[in-house]
Image (cartoon, rainbow, N blue to C red):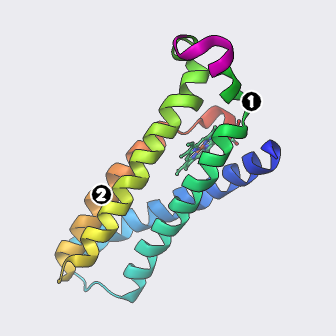
């Protein structure tokens, strides 16, 4: 169970990071070039929302089946916070990823309510960029590559 979920979470992360980067770049391009917001922009923003939500669900399952979780019982919260690896997997990574997903969700729903192209691109650019920074800051890079 753990190996399977970990494998899916690890590979799905490539899709999440890739689509998020593409949406961020295209929202800045849209802003700078003053182009009209179109169906492709909407589909991309929605696809990013869906892929990150799926990753969130996989991550929550992984959290409880991963061996790291047993550390809470073995060394307690204090012990987890003192160990940088345990702190990353059990506290920092989940927290920052959940915040990133919240930002993407807020950004998506706010951009949908805007009526013209520029505010739509601007909202996406702000919320999705902060989400991307949060994500990149707490990905366990050494374990991933
Ligand atoms: C939504 C965006 C997320 C992204 C892009 C992401 C990405 C990643 C990546 C790249 C890894 C390393 C995989 C590897 O070692 O090959 C990882 C590991 C992990 N993630 Fe996430 N994650 C996300 C959300 C979450 C959430 C919300 C949780 C928990 C609530 C979570 C829990 C974990 C755990 C426990 C590991 C360690 C897995 C292991 O031991 O193999 N992740 N994540």
Residue 48, horizontal then vertical, whole percent: 47, 67
Question: Which mark, by number, is residue 143?
Answer: none
What is the secondary structure assignment of the residue under circle 1? helix
In which quadrant will I find the C terminus?
A: top right
Residue 64 location, quadrant: top right
Q: Nearer the viewer, residue 128 or 78?
A: 78
User: Which quadrant of the picture is home to ligand 1?
Assistant: top right
The crowding category of the residue bearing disc 2, from other C-alpha atoms within 10 Å (few below 14, some 14 to 19, many at least 20), is many
Q: Is residue 27 above or below residue 13?
A: below
Q: Nearer the viewer, residue 113 or 143?
A: 113
The crowding category of the residue bearing disc 1, from other C-alpha atoms within 10 Å (few below 14, some 14 to 19, many at least 20), is few
Q: Give the main secondary structure, helix, strand or loop, of the magenta stretch.
A: helix
Q: Residue at x 30, y 57 (%)?
A: 127
What is the secondary structure assignment of the residue under circle 2? helix
Q: Nearer the viewer, residue 141 or 55?
A: 55
Left or right: 34 in relation to 62: left
Q: Residue at x 72, y 35 (%)?
A: 66
Q: Residue at x 60, y 22 (%)?
A: 86
Q: Nearer the viewer, mark 1 or mark 2?
A: 1
Residue annotated with mark 1: 67
Query: Within 8 Å of ligand 1, the CB of disc 1?
Result: yes
Residue annotated with mark 2: 127
Q: Residue at x 66, y 47 (%)?
A: 61
Residue 101 is inside the magenta segment: no
Magenta-colored span: 72-78
Residue 67 location, quadrant: top right
Q: Is residue 61 above or below residue 91?
A: below
Left or right: 25 in relation to 115: right
Tell me which numbered mark, 1 or 2, is placed earlier along the sequence.
1
Residue 116, horizontal then vertical, whole percent: 17, 83
Residue 129 can be seen, yes or no: yes
Residue 90, horizontal then vertical, whole percent: 57, 30
């Amino acid at each position: 169970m753990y190996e399977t979920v970990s494998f899916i979470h690890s590979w799905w992360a490539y899709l999440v990071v890739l689509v998020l980067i593409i949406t961020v770049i295209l929202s800045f391009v849209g802003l700078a070039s003053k182009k009209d917001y179109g169906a492709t922009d909407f589909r991309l923003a929605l696809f990013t929302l869906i892929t990150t939500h799926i990753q969130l669900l996989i991550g929550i399952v992984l959290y409880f089946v991963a061996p790291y979780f047993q550390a809470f019982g073995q060394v307690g919260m204090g012990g987890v916070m003192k160990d940088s690896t345990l702190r990353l997997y059990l506290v920092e990574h989940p927290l920052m990823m959940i915040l990133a997903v919240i930002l993407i969700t807020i950004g998506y729903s706010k951009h949908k309510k805007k009526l013209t192209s520029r505010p739509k691109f601007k909202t996406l650019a702000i919320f999705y960029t902060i989400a991307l920074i949060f994500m990149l800051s707490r990905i366990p890079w050494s374990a991933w590559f």
